[in-house]
Image (tube, rainbow, N blue to C red):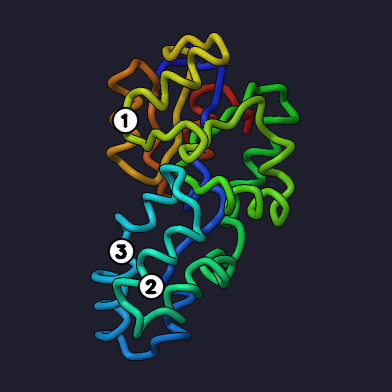
Amino acid sequence: MSKSITHVVFDIGNVLIEWNPEYLYCDLIPNNEERRKFLDTVCTPDWNLQQDLGRSWDEAIQLLSAQHPDKAGLIRAYSERWHDMVPGEIFGTPALLAELKEKGVPLYAITNFSSEKFVEAQERFPFLKSSFLDIVVSAEERLLKPDPQIYKVLFERNNLDPTKCIFIDDSLANVEAARALGMAGHHFTSAQTLERDLTDLGLLVR
């Protein structure tokens, strides 16, 4: 990666804060087979993505509960106990974010996130409010990564040159979409490997 990179763009879920429905539903549905069936056929990833696209949680729960009335309580829990899916920060990454901010590196974020839950996440994790010059939230734009348009929202709103930016995401597809638009990309697996890449770019000094 080029050392001409001057701006850092973060994903949030599973890069800065952990999110996994298993944390909640291991408690609610202890049987592995039953839990997997529920998450594969009722509260599916595609259903959740509709909230990331802007659908309200009230509407989502009402519609799905009408289809699965016997699972209404489990469906409501997806929203009412959402924080049980988010046990905390990803170890080490918020510290790197704080270090970049202290060094004056311009920081941005692009996240697939429900507007309602993102407000809650910002209240719980104050660094999500204070660290970034701009955050592109999918629900507010009605766009999801890896759609190229959501990256272009960031570029155009902030007058950014993609070739000066590195994008960090735990989804390889999202990273590849960013690279196709001219950004450098880091497929996030751990804070240690991210720290190494940021150091190689000269954004951190070790």
Query: Mark 3 vs mark 1: which is more N-terminal?
Result: 3
Which residue is labeled 1 in the image?
Answer: 147
| Mark 3 or mark 2, earlier in chain | 3
Q: Nearer the viewer, residue 185 or 157?
A: 157
Residue 36 on image: x %, y %: 28, 77
Q: CA distance from mark 3 to mark 2?
A: 13 Å
The reply to whether residue 186 is in sight is yes
Q: Amino acid at mark 2?
A: Ser
Task: Kindly identify the amino acid type of the residue bearing the numbered disc 1.
Answer: Asp
Q: Nearer the viewer, mark 3 or mark 2?
A: 2
Mark 2 or 1 closer to N-term?
2
Q: From mark 3 to mark 1, how far is it between C-alphas?
A: 20 Å
62 over 117 or under it: above or below: below
**Closer to the camera in the image, 71 or 198:** 71
Q: Residue shown at 44%/51% (left/top)?
A: 51
> Label 2 belongs to which residue?
65
The residue shown at (30%, 64%) is 44
Q: Position of residue 131 (x, y in %)?
A: 69, 35
Amino acid carrying label 3: it is Thr
Between 68 and 116, the residue placed more toward the observer is: 68
Marking on residue 44: 3
Residue 124 horizontal side relative to residue 152, left or right: right
Disc 3 and disc 2 in contact, CB within 8 angstroms? no
Residue 191 showing in the rendered view: no
Q: Are marks 2 and 1 in contact (CB under 8 Å)?
A: no
Q: Position of residue 147 (x, y in %)?
A: 31, 30
